[in-house]
Image (cartoon, coloured by chain):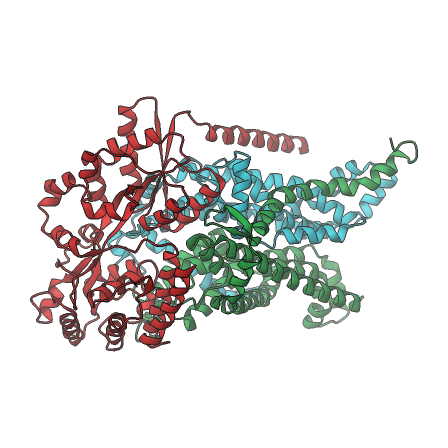
């Protein structure tokens, strides 16, 4: 027990420089978000506000219409994550479990699709969506997000799938189970942690994505959270920093919750290994 | 149709992998293939600033690009930026992932903290850091001087000598969560009993890492190296938000310059040519990496 | 268990589909208006106009979309390329050159009376070949704000009229030894070039002479040498390339700047954020000439719009009605662009505003040429090299001028 305490102290000491740097911007956000507006621009700058003004959050919520934007972001991110997994899981299963001609070529093809930054492709994607009449429609964003996450998801899933032993499935095959049955009954339950982690990656990408959303969406009602938050900083002449920081904090809460869930996926990934 | 010559299960069995990967291929072709074609097309033609293509112009876009005085500067800086950020990220992420894979008090909290930068979009991260590094009002100077580490305020983003290293450091910071999580996922999918066995055999910590852990997480390291390389090479928001390539283009990388060319200057033809060139550079580097990694694997086998 | 999960996922998908569908439904007669974000007030003002217009013209809908300046150009470029332009958009007036050249902007047919309602100077930048392509909004001229208390402490009771006076006053403020700086110098981002044009123009320089760049003329070198010597002498804030316009304005609001050159919007911000600041406004310091920078943004109608008539109706009857002009200009802190607006007590009885409007006869506007944005960036890069000491004024400006001449030829 004493040993573990010593180890814990050592581990935290090793991590501490990074922890400080990581928490620094969050401290800045919290400090600015709860300051009365007059103190935000005060000189010299101070960490602690004279009073903690939680009203800033209320004002921000009303002034910035963050609620609908949160809904849009959730919808798009969840839909894109599900669609992406629906396409990527079979593909990853095939490329980790089956030998077929063109497998290498397929992987390279996927990788190549990732080599162009969305910024580069914005104009073409926009023209494509415009020709489909999908500008300012959230499904357009969903499709684009899936396309930009496919390669990563397939690759990631396939790497995890390879760590799942084949023996169980082979036994089931001998028992006469079909490919589909094997995949559903034996493989998927074992692969759930990996799928969960991949889902989180895709979700976070969608949640934070900016360039595509900026290009494809039009009306204020369909704005996602990143656009809505960024719109607070884009002022040419004046920025309400307390609102900006409050909004950024609020926008990061759902993702932080997902991290907590991700911990479980990582831990259960461990237990899958142990059970085997 | 095929039933006559092959047994059904065989036919399905052989077609199965193709059927499984087909949707992803179609999807990628549809959403990403068209824009790539669109751009390649623009790079070869005269284009007005609103993307209307005219006649084939004899690679004029490319020759204008290569003769531009900023091209080489930006290219070199992009390579420095990419190598530093990716290298720094992976070098830091492996030990962090190893630490986070140990059992210690507060591990869950530590993992959540390490992932926090990921919870904020790059754009907003850039904004907060920019605000923090402001020489007159920023909390970095305020904190340094309150600890007595600084006499006069430093205007961090005013010259490339301080601005570019800061950009790289932030680039590393925001790449760590993704990288650590992938490696950590790889580590946690390994079986503990191998390590127990190695321990019993008397292998030292470094030996276990070098000969057991590292080879086992290699597929995951390959993922993060290649993907990070692509992402960082194309990474736009941090530099754009913090310096816009200032002062005097001394923090511009290819992608920020590309954005200026395309949307500020309306030089869509040159911008498309630059995109194709960037694409070819990435492709070449990835192929080199793939060849090296394969040779390495073969040697170890 | 598995079954339940599957059903839940399906349900979620279905729900998502319904909601996605719902957000995209739209009515038939909708006027789409894209405007730029000036401040937190922008959305409210334009939505007020839209509501007003809809009440007077039932059956029509006006949709306002507010976009950040940083993204506006990209956004409109993709819109034009994809054929999904709105009906009306706000743009930087100098972009209009490209819009007109590429046949994207619709010429405006206006009654002479309506046209006569505008202050002449603001209409000319959006006129090409005698045709008007846009209506000016967000007009500003620039002047010098000075901190009365700080100048008085340094023993200066009258604001300096010329550049020698500025240098002299800045020296006295520096001698106070506080953490205040004499003269603010903007060194990065939007309008870094403009901050130098004030000096260029008042030293008798020009941006273009005979179709060639004027930024390497002796006057230009003199203008830049002046700024550089002020940096070196510590008369400006240190390391100007780290500060954009908002940064130097913030320093002024904190009472740490003696003199700053900027536009009328700062008054509103001071009123709100630093009400106790004792300041006044004077003309831009003179050298050999008097000058200021005149800037407007423009509301224009797209040629591709199928509702041009309705769009013009919205502009002439609502957006440019005195009521909404006054609302916009006061809330955002810009100059009046219409005569009736300027005569309103809120503007006419405002002595501070006169400092800006008095300068209008000397106002220069950005030249209406293509490639302007690229030239601006070339100039800014040259200025920054000099400000951080990487280059001397003359060679830096010569290099910039050569590049600009190359761009003009394209």
On screen, residue C71 versus residue C42, left or right, reads right
Looking at the image, is B23 positioned above or below residue C209? above
Q: Nearer the viewer, residue C184 or C115?
A: C115
Q: Is residue B103 visible?
A: no
- Locate residue C30, reporting x and y percent: 38, 28
Number of numbered markers:
0
Task: Please identify the quadrant where the N terminus of chain A is shown.
Answer: bottom right
What colour is chain A? cyan
What colour is chain B? green
| Rendered image quadrant of residue B30 | top right
Chain in red colour: C
- Tell which residue pokes out farthest to the left in this image: C157
- Tell which residue pokes out farthest to the right in this image: B5
Looking at the image, is A259 positioned above or below residue C55? below
- Locate residue A198, reporting x and y percent: 62, 48
- Locate residue A79, reporting x and y percent: 56, 37
- Locate residue C112, reporting x and y percent: 20, 35
Q: Nearer the viewer, residue A188 or A9?
A: A188
Looking at the image, is C179 positioned above or below residue B239? below
Looking at the image, is A180 positioned above or below residue B62? above
């Amino acid at each position: 027990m004493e040993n573990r305490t010593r180890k814990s102290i050592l581990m935290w000491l090793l991590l501490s420089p990074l922890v400080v740097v990581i928490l620094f911007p969050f401290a800045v956000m919290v400090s600015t978000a709860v300051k009365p507006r007059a103190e935000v621009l005060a000189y010299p700058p101070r960490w602690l506000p004279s009073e903690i003004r939680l009203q800033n959050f209320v004002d921000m919520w009303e002034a910035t219409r963050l609620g609908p934007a949160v809904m849009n972001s959730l919808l798009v991110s969840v839909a894109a994550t599900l669609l992406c997994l629906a396409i990527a899981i079979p593909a990853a299963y095939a490329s980790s479990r089956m030998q077929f001609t063109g497998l290498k070529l397929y992987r390279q093809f996927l990788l190549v699709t990732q080599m162009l930054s969305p910024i580069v492709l914005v104009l073409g994607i926009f023209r494509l969506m415009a020709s489909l009449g999908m500008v300012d429609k959230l499904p357009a964003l969903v499709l684009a997000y899936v396309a930009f996450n496919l390669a990563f998801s397939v690759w990631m899933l396939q790497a995890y799938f390879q760590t799942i032993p084949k023996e169980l499935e082979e036994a089931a095959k001998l028992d006469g189970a079909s490919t589909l049955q094997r995949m559903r009954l034996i493989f998927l339950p074992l692969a759930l942690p990996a799928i969960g982690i991949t889902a989180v990656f895709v979700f976070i990408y969608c949640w934070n994505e900016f360039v595509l959303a900026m290009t494809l969406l039009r009306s204020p009602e369909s704005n996602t959270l990143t656009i809505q938050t960024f719109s607070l900083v884009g002022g040419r002449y004046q920025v309400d920093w307390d609102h900006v920081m409050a909004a950024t904090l609020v926008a990061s809460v759902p993702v932080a919750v997902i991290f907590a869930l991700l911990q479980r996926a990582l831990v259960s990934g461990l237990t899958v290994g142990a059970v085997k | 149709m095929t039933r006559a010559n092959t047994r059904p299960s065989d036919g399905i069995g052989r077609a199965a992998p193709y059927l499984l990967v087909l949707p992803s291929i179609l999807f990628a072709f549809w959403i990403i293939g068209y824009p790539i074609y669109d751009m390649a097309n623009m790079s070869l033609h005269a284009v007005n600033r609103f993307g209307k293509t005219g006649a084939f112009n004899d690679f004029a876009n490319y020759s204008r690009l290569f003769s531009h005085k900023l091209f080489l500067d930006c290219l070199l800086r992009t390579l420095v930026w990419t190598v530093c950020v990716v290298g720094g990220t992976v070098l830091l992420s492996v030990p962090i992932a190893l630490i986070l894979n140990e059992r210690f008090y507060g591990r869950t909290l530590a993992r959540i903290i390490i992932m926090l930068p990921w919870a904020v979009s790059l754009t907003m991260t850039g904004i907060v850091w920019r605000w923090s590094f402001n020489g007159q009002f920023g909390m970095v100077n305020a904190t340094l001087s309150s600890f007595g580490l600084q006499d006069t305020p430093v205007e961090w983003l005013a010259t490339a000598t301080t601005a570019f290293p800061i950009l790289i450091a932030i680039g590393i910071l925001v790449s760590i969560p993704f990288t650590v999580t992938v490696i950590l996922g790889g580590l946690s999918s390994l079986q503990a009993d191998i390590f127990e066995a190695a321990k019993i055999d008397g292998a030292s910590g470094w030996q276990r890492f070098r000969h057991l852990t590292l080879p086992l997480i290699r597929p995951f390291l390959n993922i993060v190296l290649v993907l990070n390389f692509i992402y960082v090479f194309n990474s736009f928001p941090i530099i754009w938000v913090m310096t816009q390539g200032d002062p005097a283009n001394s923090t511009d990388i290819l992608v920020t310059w590309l954005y200026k060319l395309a949307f500020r200057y309306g030089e869509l033809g040159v911008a498309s040519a630059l995109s194709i060139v960037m694409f070819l550079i990435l492709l070449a580097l990835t192929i080199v990496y793939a060849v090296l990694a394969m040779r390495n694997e073969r040697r170890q086998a | 268990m598995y079954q339940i999960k599957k059903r839940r996922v399906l349900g979620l998908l279905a729900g998502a589909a319904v909601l996605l569908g719902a957000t995209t439904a739209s009515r038939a007669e909708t006027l789409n208006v894209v405007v730029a974000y000036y401040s937190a007030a922008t959305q409210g003002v334009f939505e007020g106009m839209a509501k007003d217009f809809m009440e007077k013209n039932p059956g029509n809908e006006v949709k306002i979309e507010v976009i950040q300046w940083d993204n506006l150009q990209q956004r409109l470029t993709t819109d034009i390329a994809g054929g999904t332009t709105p009906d009306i958009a706000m743009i930087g007036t100098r972009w209009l050159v490209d819009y007109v050249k590429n046949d994207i902007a619709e010429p405006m047919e206006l009654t002479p009376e309506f046209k006569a309602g505008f202050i002449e100077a603001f209409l000319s930048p959006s006129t090409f070949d005698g045709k008007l392509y846009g209506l000016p909004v967000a007009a500003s001229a620039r002047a010098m704000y000075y901190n009365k208390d700080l100048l008085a402490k340094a023993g200066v009771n009258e604001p300096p009229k010329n550049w020698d006076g500025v240098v002299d006053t800045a020296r006295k403020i520096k001698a106070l030894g506080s953490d205040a700086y004499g003269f603010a110098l903007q060194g990065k981002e939007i309008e870094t070039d403009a901050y130098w044009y004030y000096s260029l123009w008042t030293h008798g320089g020009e941006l273009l002479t005979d179709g060639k760049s004027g930024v390497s003329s002796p006057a230009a070198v003199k203008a830049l040498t002046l700024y550089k010597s002020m940096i070196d002498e510590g008369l400006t804030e240190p390391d100007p390339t780290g500060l954009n316009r908002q940064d130097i304005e913030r320093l002024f609001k904190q009472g740490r700047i003696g003199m700053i050159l900027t536009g009328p919007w700062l008054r509103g911000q001071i009123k709100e954020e630093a009400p106790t600041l004792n300041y006044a406004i004077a003309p831009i310091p003179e050298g050999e000439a008097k000058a200021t920078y005149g800037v407007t943004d423009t509301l224009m109608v797209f040629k591709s719009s199928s509702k041009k008539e309705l769009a013009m109706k919205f502009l002439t009857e609502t957006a440019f009605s005195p009521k909404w002009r006054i609302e916009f200009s006061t809330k955002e802190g810009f100059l009046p662009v219409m005569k009736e607006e300027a005569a309103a007590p809120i503007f006419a009885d405002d002595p501070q505003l006169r400092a800006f409007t008095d300068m209008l006869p000397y106002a220069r506007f950005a030249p209406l040429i293509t490639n302007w944005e690229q030239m601006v960036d070339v100039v800014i890069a040259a200025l920054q090299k000099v400000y951080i000491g990487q280059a001397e004024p003359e060679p830096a400006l010569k290099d910039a001028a050569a590049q600009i001449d190359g761009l003009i030829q394209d």
